[in-house]
Image (cartoon, grey):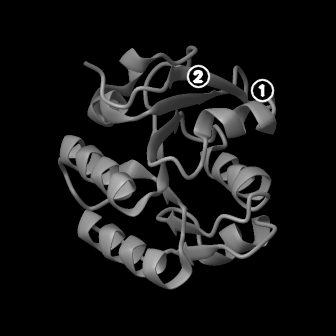
């Protein structure tokens, strides 16, 4: 899948919640940086990147433009909401990346998903949330999400990153595209 196709699927600026899930070392952080470099930057969309796993310097060194990076440790959903509101008001951000879901200091993933969806709608943002996928090394499906399933159910788009071997190219699997809440 090329970035033109990905751009149409993610469709930044349309009040969306996008879940990107992959196993450890599947390239989730680099994928998010590539989405910024090849979609948000190209469209001149101010972006906020919550980097809960990598340092601010790592993210900035791999990006090709101005990116607001917050690498504060142990953040809560309330902190994410306040930062998004502040940067929306001061810099008109339109895209938010959260790396990654399981490092947000709120235990109820369903509540986190619902609040992120509400935040996207309230501020007119596209929020891309990375999620760690654990388990067997087979091609992932929605069933593999387990704890993250609640957020997948209310996400507009669910993508999986999959590598058959550590040196193979990363495959992007579109597991859900459109609709938001599953009825």
Residue in the foreground of this view, choosing between 39 and 138: 39
- Image quarter (top left, top right, bottom left or bottom right) of the C terminus: top left
At 56% from the left and 28% from the top, the residue drawn is: 160
Question: Which label sits on residue 81?
Answer: none
Circles 1 and 2, Cβ within 8 Å, touching? The answer is yes
Mark 1 or mark 2: which comes first in sequence? 1
Q: Give residue 18's position: percent from left, percent from top.
A: 48, 41
Q: Is residue 72 above or below residue 148?
A: below
- Image quarter (top left, top right, bottom left or bottom right) of the N terminus: top right
Residue in the foreground of this view, choosing between 123 and 56: 123
Q: Give residue 107's position: percent from left, percent from top.
A: 19, 51
Q: Is residue 80 above or below residue 101?
A: below
Query: What residue does disc 2 label?
Result: 174
| C-alpha gap between disc 1 and disc 2 | 10 Å
Q: Please rate how many residues cluster around mark 1, counting C-alpha atoms within 10 Å: few if below 14, some from 14 to 19, many from 20.
A: few
Q: Is residue 138 above or below residue 135?
A: above
Residue 131 visible in the current orientation: no
| Label total for image | 2
At 68% from the left and 46% from the top, the residue drawn is: 31
Q: Give residue 115's position: percent from left, percent from top.
A: 25, 53
Residue 94, picture quadrant:
bottom right
Q: Secondary structure at mark 2?
A: strand
Query: In the visual, does 133 lie left or right of 28?
Result: left
Q: Give residue 37's position: percent from left, percent from top.
A: 77, 58
Q: Secondary structure at mark 1?
A: loop
Residue 29 visible in the current orientation: yes
Residue 106, picture quadrant:
bottom left
Query: What residue does disc 1 label?
Result: 1
At 55% from the left and 66% from the top, the residue drawn is: 49
Residue in the foreground of this view, choosing between 11 and 80: 11
At 30% from the left and 29% from the top, the residue drawn is: 181
Query: In the visual, does 117 lie left or right of 161?
Result: left
């Amino acid at each position: 899948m090329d970035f033109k196709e990905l751009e149409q699927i993610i469709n930044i600026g349309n009040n969306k919640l996008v879940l990107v899930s992959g196993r450890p070392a599947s390239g989730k952080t680099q994928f998010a940086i590539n989405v910024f470099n090849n979609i948000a930057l190209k469209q001149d969309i101010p972006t906020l990147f919550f980097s809960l796993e990598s340092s601010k310097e790592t993210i900035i060194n791999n990006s090709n433009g101005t990116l607001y990076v917050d690498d504060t440790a142990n953040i809560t959903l309330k902190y994410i909401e306040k930062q998004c509101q502040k940067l929306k008001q001061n810099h008109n951000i339109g895209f938010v990346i959260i790396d990654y879901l399981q490092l947000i200091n709120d235990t109820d993933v369903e509540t986190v998903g619902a609040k992120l969806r509400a935040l996207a709608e309230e501020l007119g943002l596209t929020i891309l949330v990375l999620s760690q996928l654990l388990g067997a090394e087979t091609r992932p499906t929605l069933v593999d999400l387990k704890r993250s399933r609640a957020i997948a159910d209310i996400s507009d788009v669910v993508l999986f990153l999959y590598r058959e071997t550590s040196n193979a190219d990363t495959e992007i699997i579109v597991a859900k595209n459109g609709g938001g809440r599953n009825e």
